Amino acid sequence: MASESRAASLPGRLGMLGDAVIIRHTLFSLPFAIVAVLLETGGRPPLRSLLLIVLAAASARNAANALNRVIDADMDAKNPRTSGRHVPTGQLSKKELLLFAALMSVILVVAAAMLNWLCVALLPAAALLIGGYSYTKRFTWLCHYWLGVACAAAPMGAFVALAGRFEFRYFVLAGAVALWVAGFDILYALQDIDFDRREGVHSVPARFGARRARVISALSHLGTIAALASLPLFWDLSWAYGAGVLLAAGLLVAEHVIVRGG
């Protein structure tokens, strides 16, 4: 009976793990890696490489989120906005999330090894980015940009997986992603400005105030659009790409208007 009960609860535990790391949002973290693949292959990626890159990016992202939940568990418990998360409420243990992160890390290592030697050589840097973000908010307001660089590792990793080398143009797309994520994270941190100041958590809003934080976020997103607009200098892109950049710019402007109005 006990074994049957544990077996019956397994899908529920897995479901809670997926909710804890917001695994469904993996779909939103993959597009830039896929864009990098399409750019580098002229829209005709080898299926094996594409699948391995998607697997590596998804596993890295899920490992990072699992570690974040563990490292931030005590902080989350104090914050009314996050106190209902799985670890603070006891729905999941830190051990379970660490095991999940370890599994995702193994998948990442295997995928990297199946791509090329440079991907394997860069794994320590990836580990530093993945594991370091949660600690950066404890000592610097630049934590948003650390997160941006960590997310930018997805398209950069895709380029390296395909080309086996670094090129300047790869850093342009990676820079666009880093600034895009950082800008969003700054706006996201606005809702925790009082908590961050009270608990000594470092963030752009806590350091500079809400108004200046919105300006810094807007400048970051301006950098994103500038980087995206420059990509046709490095790749042969159609008019549809330019229309997409204009649409992205419009959406970012709308978001900042909404945040300012709120």
Image (cartoon, grey):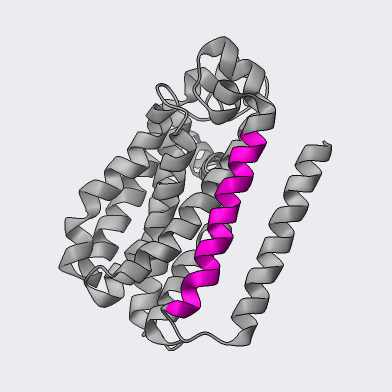
Q: Which residue is more in the foreground, 119 or 109?
A: 119
Q: In this view, does 192 lie above or below 123?
A: above
State the image coordinates of residue 257 (x, y, percent, origin top left).
79, 46
Quarter of the image where one finds residue 54: bottom left
State the image coordinates of residue 6 (x, y, percent, origin top left).
49, 38
Q: Which residue is more in the foreground, 51 or 253?
A: 253
User: Is 64 on the left-hand or right-hand side of 227?
Assistant: left
Magenta region: 213-233
Q: Kindly give the residue lying farthest to the right in the view shown.
A: 261
Most common secondary structure along the magenta stretch: helix
At 16% from the left edge and 57% from the top edge, which residue is drawn? 121
At 33% from the left edge and 77% from the top edge, which residue is drawn? 49
Q: Which residue is more in the foreground, 234 or 13?
A: 234
Q: In this view, does 181 lie above or below 250?
A: above
- Quarter the C terminus occupies: top right
Q: Is residue 81 above or below residue 197?
A: below
Q: Which residue is more in the foreground, 182 or 73?
A: 182
User: Is 260 on the left-hand or right-hand side of 76?
Assistant: right
Q: Can residue 22 be seen in this view?
A: no
User: Is 205 on the left-hand or right-hand side of 148?
Assistant: right
State the image coordinates of residue 254 (x, y, percent, origin top left).
77, 54
At 44% from the left edge and 66% from the top edge, which residue is drawn? 33
Q: Is residue 228 above or below residue 216?
A: below
State the image coordinates of residue 35 (x, y, percent, origin top left).
48, 73
Q: How many labels does the image show?
A: 0
User: Is 192 on the left-hand or right-hand side of 146?
Assistant: right
Q: Can residue 69 be seen in this view?
A: yes
Queried whether the magenta region covers residue 212, the answer comes back as no
